[in-house]
Image: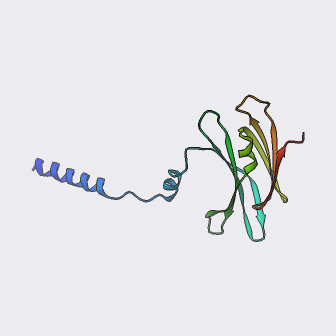
Amino acid sequence: MFRQIVLAAALVAGLAAMAPAHADALLDGLKTIPGSIEDVRIAGTWDQGTKTGAYRVIIARTVGEAVTARLFVQWIVYHDDGTNTVDNTIEIKELVDLKLDIVDYTSESDADGLSVFIQTLNPNGSTDQNYELFVTSPTEYRFGPASN
């Protein structure tokens, strides 16, 4: 009798191990984020017509002799059913050309768009510099040295 109980318990445990786990789309999606993504922040909110949402700023870093950063801005849309989606994504290509790393940044949003103030580190030892990014739409932005 004891042996039958042990075998039954082993069978139940084996079947439980074979059963598929509940799918978790969020967790599965997080597992696909590249390791080079090192910073993700909500940088402010926006609204345009019937759409509302948040700006998400993403920093990815290269590996190698000199660490350099890539900077992306996304428009996250909040839907009435409580879900959200990525509406647009842009990369600030000028930063890639400068071959700098981002030490920190601050951001503000208003009716005109998103302002990001960026502190950089030059991996080649040259003078570090601050930059400003002004994003008015997914097709229009200005990037350059900070004016202050």
- In the image, what residue occupies the spot 23% across and 55% down? 12
Depicted 68 relative to depicted 33: above or below: above
- Percent position (x, y) of residue 2? 12, 47
**Is 85 left or right of 130, judged from the image as shown?**
left
Residue farthest left in this picture: 1
Residue 147 rendering spot, x and y as whole percentages: 89, 42
Foreground pick, 65 / 55? 65
* Quadrant position of residue 63: top right
Foreground: 94 or 89? Answer: 94
* Spot occupied by residue 138 in the image (x, y as percentages of width and height): 75, 61
Residue at image coords 59%, 35%: 64
Q: Residue at x 77, y 38 (%)?
A: 119
The structure's colour scheme is: rainbow
Q: Position of residue 118 (x, y in %)?
A: 77, 42
In the rendered image, the vertical position of residue 124 relative to residue 24, given as above or below: above
On screen, residue 25 versus residue 114, left or right, reads left
Q: Quadrant of residue 48?
A: bottom right
Instruction: Classify the position of the C terminus by image quarter.
Output: top right
Q: Residue furthest right?
A: 148
